[in-house]
Image: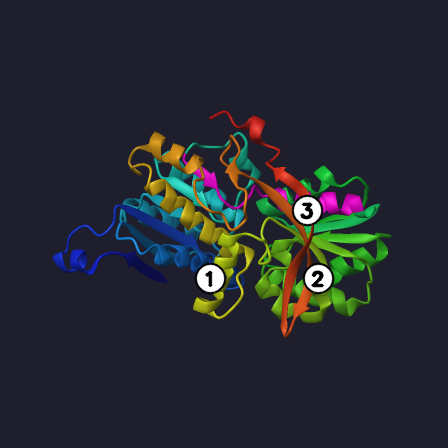
Amino acid sequence: MKTLIMATAAAALAAGSAVADVKVGMITTLSGGGASLGIDTRDGFMLAIEAAGRDDIEVVIEDDQRKPDIAVQLADKMIQSEKVDVLTGIVWSNLAMAVVPAATAQGLFYLSTNAAPAQLAGKGCNSNYFAISYQNDNLHEGAGAYAAKEGFKNTFIMAPNYPAGHDSLNGFKRYYEGDLAGEVFTKLGQTDYAAEIAQIRASGADSVFFFLPGGMGISFLKQYADSGVDLPVVGPAFSFDQGILQAVGEAALGVKNSSTWSKDLDNAANAAFVADFQQKYDRLPSIYAAQGFDTANLLLSAMDKADVNDDAAFAEALKSADFASVRGAFSFAANNHPVQNVYVREVIKEGDIYTNKIVGTALESHANAYVDECKM
């Protein structure tokens, strides 16, 4: 599946002249179990591009099907045939690890709308790689800080067995102060959690932390609610995003989750984004949409300052983060990952819609644990 979207003047098209000064390749998940995440990423990104109404940017969009080999093939085609200047859009960290190092080695810029594994934040950092979302550990660090503040002493923790899953549990443990009743890595894409719920029941845990994005989170939450296990649940926003909540329903009410963004963040950029997204797509945005939107606006701001063909100047323009983030205060640490707040949200119901509201701040002006390992 391929989508080609060009923001360009009609006259330029008619003349057959060059239609873009910057060509962007978006590789994201548009089919299968993780499709809602990629669709939100794409829609948030394109909302910003289309609103800008510029004639100097072209976006080519492809579906990675959540398969690393497909992502690599698409990246190779975009670099060699499409001649893109910038790559973006990958949701899953195992796909990012398959694509990003090779892309930056060939001189391309990679702007991450989501996946930000530890390997690319520390020793594997690169001056052409920017994570606009977070560093993978961040939201889980916020959840760990919240669990510690709540006084949980024996938490059962669980995540899928792929790079972001390992970052998740490492991040949680970095700020959590209690013991672990269990630590389990599940299969990526798993939908049956009967065995894990039985382990939780038998573990003596006083709480549960889990990171299961997309359809995995829907399956677990429904099964957990039906199991009769009545322990407090904490997770990152990925397990309680807008799409997941509508599928899970009442089982998620009251659950606390950590996030760098929420639809009720009180700043002008966010208010406009939420309203515009709802008007265009007839649904509330998720964190994936917010990150896609911010990534596009960062890119547009850098294009106003530097030529994408001048690596050093364009990297510096990106680094300045001269755009109005929907997250409010936003800057980059030395390893090109955000410095931002991590909030605590609670799942609520507004009319017929399940959503989140901010109830606290877990970590303020938070960077990441790998800055000192980055030697670029």
Task: Tell us which disc is closer to us: 1 or 2.
Answer: 1
Query: What residue is rendered at 55% in x and 55% in y?
Result: 287
Is residue 315 visible to the viewer in this orientation of the structure? yes
Highlighted range, magenta: 128-149
Mark toward the start of the polypeptide (2 vs 3): 2
Front residue of 18/374: it is: 18
Which labelled disc corresponds to residue 193? 2
Label 1, label 2: how far apart the Cα atoms are: 26 Å
Residue 95, percent from left and from top = 48, 48
Residue type at mark 2 is: Tyr
Residue type at mark 3 is: Thr
Which labelled disc corresponds to residue 39? 1
Quadrant where the image shows the N terminus: bottom left
Q: Give the structural element (helix, strand or loop) at label 3.
A: strand
Q: Which residue is mark 3?
A: 361
Residue 34, percent from left and from top = 53, 60
144 inside magenta stretch: yes
